[in-house]
Image (cartoon, rainbow, N blue to C red):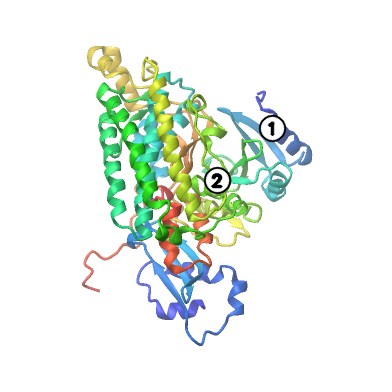
Amino acid sequence: MSLKLTEALQKTVDSLTQTFADKVIEVYQSSGDTFIRVETDAIIDISNHLKNELHYIYLSDVFGIDRYTSEERFEVVYNLLSLRDQTRVFIKVRCEEENPEVESVTSVWPAAGWPEREVYDMFGVKFRNHPDLRRIFLPEDFQYYPLRKEFPLLGIPGSIELPSTTPDSD
Amino acid sequence: MKLTDIQNKVHSTFFKEHQKSLYQSLEDKHTTLEELDDGDPLTTKMVLNMGPQHPATHGVLRLVLQLDGETIEKCKLDIGYLHRGVEKIAENKTYQEFMPYTDRMDYLSPYSNNVALCTAVEKIASVEVPERAHYIRMIGCELARISSHLLWLGTMVMDAGAISFFIWTFKEREKIYDVMDRIAGHRFTVSHARIGGVANDLTDEATGAIKEFVDTFPKELKDYHKLLDRNRIFFERNEAVGVLKTEDAIASGATGPLLRGSGFGLDIRKVSPYLRYNEVEFDVPTRLEGDNLARYYVRMEEMHESIRIIKQCLNKLPYGPIRTDNAKQAYPSKDEVYYSMEGMIHDFMMTDTGICPPEGAECYHAVESPKGELGYYIQSDGTGHPWRLKIKAPSFSNLQVLENMLDGEMVADTVVIIGGTDPVLGEADK
């Protein structure tokens, strides 16, 4: 599939494919958005390159996707905005179902702190070297990862401690 | 203060692991400072839990503050008290069915959220939206922005000490509710946008109500300015409070008025114009100071700009259909449903299956909601339900900024800074 890229995006893609020739797995477009999938172990180098050389200084979001039955089940997506060129690009990495781990990009973009905690909370993907990797929405006592596809919509009864309905009696 | 000290005094009865890790993380936050002042003979240090049910925390936000006298040494936020799992719900609903849930995300500006979802679905499924619908949506979005900023203004000024102001801004919000009632048939959770257009056309009554509001509101806004712009107390409470530097704002992902108040004029309406924002004239108010007062000016000016946009929309409002006339993509009009067999079948199919974007398609579309960049990422598996729907909520990003912005401030300024950040927990907690 041929890509329809603006000048600034073309520069980004060229620069990445040249510098990290063996790390960029695929570049594709869908509904007008540009997605670049890269090797998981190269995410810090690529992030640094994107931030320092290509002016992607604003990280708008990080989120996870559960690919369920596919190989390399979990996908982490970084939503980046270049404030100079006003272009948006999505960087994707994948990780295994067993013990999913990705290097945290908080050292490059401090904004990744909370969104990475959210990915951890919802999918159980761990971020190495994250300064404060705790669950963000659910309490630490909760043991499941609710946005994984196998988690039932109705929840798991008894998985979360609920307050006593008769507060006077201990 | 050491974790063991805190645990000796605080006896958690609930979610014990959670409480423990939260206090642990407070202890761990920039530990270098911690080692310097070990030993506290005057016991000026304490850990203060604020919220989740504090009236000034704008919803169920919990702050754990470590104080040294009246100064906040460091602070941790605990959110999630309003977590309903809307992203999980979205995976089990059709796109149109999910829309009422978006009303309840940022419940202060439901219209923007409806439009954010609809534009994202229209982008992934390549739906053409008629010209008139674009303009009606713009009017709705800008009214929602004014409504949201009015609530911010009322509560923020109330946090700074002026109670009666809240009632005056609510008088104006009440008028917007009435206008929304005439536009959409609902006052609060409007659900007026539809995939492919809007639910119903503007009636003459609704247009009249919008015109009347647009004519009378600038006068009210002028009164607010008169009351606050040279108000000594308001200035003392807000000037140089909660200062956020431009580079910190960008690095920590601030968005919306928080970022624009810190000197960077990022507005999605200008960066990647959606609807017909490229056809109307408006400015992006930006301030350099980065304090709470700068955010006040930014939001006040944004209300002026919104009025300007609505006026232009009313002038430009073209005639024509309000929803795309393609039964595979959007609901047919009620006339068709009641009087033709095909219309009835299409209506049923839209409700049952809904719109099906192509398999494997992904898209991200962001709008500038009153709080900042509100984006929807959708991944489709070819059915009527999204495989993954991610909401990039502006309040969530701004609360992360707040966590570091509070360090070093006075405890009395906490509520004012929260007010200036303007978080909505319904959106941050998803």
Q: Is residue B364 visible?
A: no
Disc 1 residue type? Ala
Q: Chain of mark 2?
A: A
Query: Mark 2 — residue?
Result: A61
B323 versus B265 height, above or below: above
Query: Badge 1 is on which residue?
Result: A8
Q: Is residue B47 above or below residue A1?
A: below
Tell which of A108 and B370 is nearer to you: B370
The x and y percentages for residue B293 are: 48, 53
Counting residues from the start of the chain, the first of labels 2 and 1 encountered is: 1
Q: Amino acid at mark 2?
A: Asp
The residue at 55%/45% (across/down) is A61
**Residue at (44% x, 64% y) in the render:** B413
Callout 1: chain: A
Residue at 41% x, 25% y is B313
Q: CA distance from mark 2 to mark 1?
A: 21 Å
SS label for mark 1: helix
Instruction: Please tell me in which quadrant of the rendered image residue B107 appears.
Output: top left
Q: Nearer the viewer, mark 2 or mark 1?
A: 1
Q: Compare residues B72 and B16 and report the one nearer the observer.
A: B72
Which corner quadrant of the image does residue B129 belong to?
top left
Residue B13 percent coordinates (x, y): 35, 72
Q: Residues within 10 Å of mark 2 (few under 14, many from 20)?
A: many
- Circles 2 and 1 on the same chain: yes
In the image, what residue occupies the spot 33% across and 27% down? Answer: B352
Give residue A103's quadrant in the image.
bottom right
